[in-house]
Image: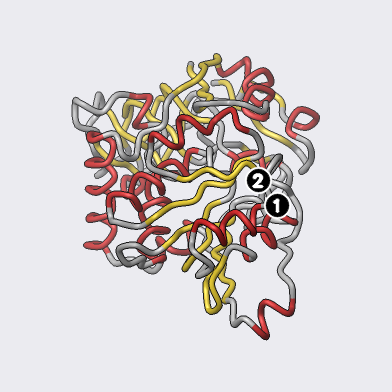
Amino acid sequence: MRMIRFERPGSPLDVLECVQAPDPEPPPGRVRVRISARPVNPSDLLYVRGRYGRPPPSPSPVGFEAAGVVDACGAGAGPAPGTRVALDAAGTWQDLVVADPADLTVLPDDIGDDDACQMSINPPTALLLVRLAGLRTGQWLVQNAGASAVARMVTRLAVRAGARCVSIVRSGRHSAALRELGATVIDASSEPVGDRCADLTAGRGAAVAFDAVGGQASDQAVRCLADGGRLVVYGLMSGQPATVRTEDLIFRSVGVEGFWLPERLRTLDRDERAGLAAAVVDGLRTGVLRSEVEARYPLAGFADAVRHAAAPGRTGKILLTP
């Protein structure tokens, strides 16, 4: 089988390579999945750079989610061969993945591969972020990286719950689409973010801000918060440490906390995880948790896919197919 892997952390285009590896055989209690689609996510590329929560082994495969079909089962394992599944496991940028059945979601017929291969990371992240925010009707939520897949999902969920959303973007190219979702857009390239947010909230500020960027964007988001507001950091798109002024922590009682999906999932019991999975499927069916696909590349074309995923102005996900 083909496998995309890296020997050492670094820039993805410098260290990733496509190699041939023996087809893995599933041991007792495990199943083998033939992968049909997987997205290129920011977390995948952070992992390659050695900046995603856990140190990669050497060599290391790439990818954390996918969709595919079970094609072999170890003793005592299921679901049966031929079953379509979504996969939440490490190393999905390869043809075959051996996985624990607990990491699989059996797919209903009306959920296609484009949605299924993206259902393990961004949709539960959006759902859990909105639950964590606990916003009341009329309260304001601020998000940077406002045009990202997670931010769009959060906006749909929060608006439906009665919250008011501000999406901070770096250019106006996504403004019309975000307004259609119900967000108020602040273009950081041409507007003073803090002043504009103060005007929108009549000087009260936002209750919560979600930060997917880090660096100075973190401070920018904090300037939008009310005294006692909360900054939730869940991404580091800039690659820079989150910057928050000491004055905001001391004199304005701003709270700062991190969010990492694997850690949050570990706090859920079986029933809670089942409920979350059901909510994801429902959100895919209604469109609230869907992400459009902008382009598909064959697995061997991973370098072009990585370049496309990093390009500014993207409006949808980049997928790797067989």
Image position of 119 (left or right of 51): left
Quarter holding residue 120:
top left
Question: Decide: marks 1, 2 in contact (CB < 8 A)?
Answer: yes
Residue 88, position as x, y percentages in the image: 42, 43
Farthest-out residue, left: 109
Label 2: element kind: helix
Q: Does residue 214 sit above or below 322 in this rendering? A: below
Q: Position of residue 228 (x, y in %)?
A: 53, 79
Quadrant for residue 188, please give it.
Answer: top right
Camera-side residue of 298 and 311: 311
In this view, the residue in front, 65 or 136, is 136
- Label 1, label 2: how far apart the Cα atoms are: 6 Å
Quarter of the picture holding the N terminus: top right
x, y percent for residue 42: 60, 40
Rendered position, 245 above or below 193: below
Q: Is residue 128 above or below residue 81?
A: below
Disc 1 is placed on an element classified as loop
Q: Which residue is mark 1?
A: 51
Q: Is residue 8 left or right of residue 229?
A: right
Residue drawn at x 26%, y 62% as measured from the top left: 272
Residue flagged by tag 2: what amino acid is it?
Tyr
- The residue located at (35%, 53%) in the rendering is 158
Residue drawn at (59%, 72%) of the image:
256
Q: Amino acid at mark 1?
A: Arg
Q: Is residue 186 above or below residue 204?
A: above
- The quadrant holding residue 240 is bottom right
What residue is at 50 percent from the left and 70 percent from the top? 204
* Circle 1 Cα neighbour tier, 10 Å, few/some/many (<14 / 14–19 / ≥20): some
Q: Furthest-bottom residue in view?
A: 250
Left/right placement of residue 9 relative to residue 116 reads right
Circle 2 Cα neighbour tier, 10 Å, few/some/many (<14 / 14–19 / ≥20): many
What residue is shown with label 2? 47
